Amino acid sequence: MELIEPTPRTRVRQHAERGRYDRQTVHRIIDAAMICHVGIVDDAQPFVLPMVHARIEDVLYLHGAYGSRLLDALRHGARACVTFTLLDGLVLARSALHHSLNYRSVVVLGEGREVTDAAEKWRAFEAIVEHAVPGRWTEIRPPSDEEARATAVVAIEIREASAKIRTGGVKESVRDRDPQVWAGQVTLATFALGLVGEPELAATALPPPSVRALLTRRLDARRNAGNGA
Amino acid sequence: MELIEPTPRTRVRQHAERGRYDRQTVHRIIDAAMICHVGIVDDAQPFVLPMVHARIEDVLYLHGAYGSRLLDALRHGARACVTFTLLDGLVLARSALHHSLNYRSVVVLGEGREVTDAAEKWRAFEAIVEHAVPGRWTEIRPPSDEEARATAVVAIEIREASAKIRTGGVKESVRDRDPQVWAGQVTLATFALGLVGEPELAATALPPPSVRALLTRRLDARRNAGNGA
């Protein structure tokens, strides 16, 4: 088990027993999350925005339009916090303040670096599409030179990071544990409900394999098989 | 339609047509989101953490342990950004860079205020439980004085806020719109998969109405009926 050494900023303090610092756990949560929340500081004000992402080894990739406040800040090396959260269940106790959630989360602290190398940018585009819909990249028209140039890509190294995971049932005092009163977990999952084709589609234009595959698995457990988390 | 006047910090700049500034839309997205992501700044470093929340009129409530870095900062009036994101679908184009997501999101910029009034704190506890599981509050043991005193509650006024919503299908160039190639939306939804009762439960201890109700509806559309968003 390879550790990502916790720092005073990433060591889990509240419920320290939920902290995880092994690289594989961190990577799996990042990969299973469809989106992340990226925080930056602008003039002493925090801003947090949802973004799609991809990971290649120890690097996170984000993309967006030039001129976006968030992307521009990251391109210029802004400090960032990128947070990934998978909500796995509600934990329903018999007492109000022992209600809880089961979740897997990761916090990455780092700095943005603009990706200017064309080959690295291309790999990032591919990784972002494949992260959202595995198998999709080979089904679609790749970016033109013009499209690629018009899109900003930012890399953030996964060097300072930690995971926090809660699993299991209710933790409450023995006095509250009345066996006659129901308490337990409600497990949650995100699914693809269905497809809405574009209006111009020919009747013979069927969804390709990557799209059909989305309909058969939980989206919050993508690429996460065998993790057991 | 009552507007929340956009500021230079909350006016949507990228895809300005997706910005929404009416109070009802902002409130509905906040209410439909099970969790939020709260950003603060500590020593010039942004931190973003997932939290549960509730809304009462124009006030957001968050809670947590005394001693938590995030709660302590908010209690002392830290500037915060609270972001709510509901992922409604994947938008799968024929071209890589026109892939997109359908989502509803809200950003609230504000400052924390510690809730010290016992009655307001009680209303916040009730709202947080009811937000996660409607109908749950009357089924459970309410907080004891000791439990209430040991839990920090923070309020943030919803004064500076905006929503951003994407709906609909693929936007791509006419040249890419080959009717023989499938393109469209994959709609997403979060459900309660099932229940896991605590091991000590008597066979006669059945899930109460609030818990059974969770199994019959989409969790990402809670209290959101009729919104049409």
Image (cartoon, coloured by chain):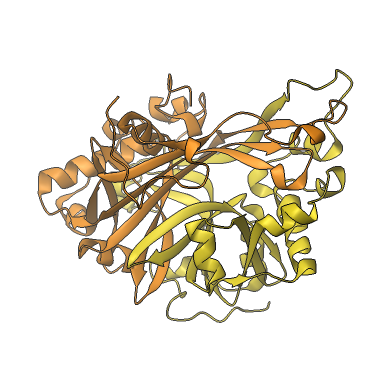
Chain colours: A orange, B yellow
Residue B226 position within the rendered picture, expressed as x and y whole percent measured from the top left: 74, 56
Identify the residue shown where x is 44% and y is 56%: B48
Question: Is residue A165 something that shows in the picture?
Answer: yes
Residue A77 or B118: which is nearer the viewer? B118
Question: Is residue A204 something that shows in the picture?
Answer: no
Query: For residue B3, which quarter of the picture?
Result: bottom right
Identify the residue shown where x is 84% and y is 25%: A179
Please tell me whether residue A149 is drawn above or below residue A192 in the rendered image.
below
Q: Is residue B52 left or right of residue A154?
A: right
Query: For residue B15, which quarter of the picture?
Result: bottom left
Residue B182 or A189: which is nearer the viewer? A189
Identify the residue shown where x is 62% and y is 60%: B62
Residue B105 position within the rendered picture, expressed as x and y whole percent measured from the top left: 53, 59
Residue A25 position within the rendered picture, expressed as x and y whole percent measured from the top left: 38, 31
Q: Quadrant of the N terminus of chain A?
A: top left
Q: Is residue B37 left or right of residue A170?
A: left
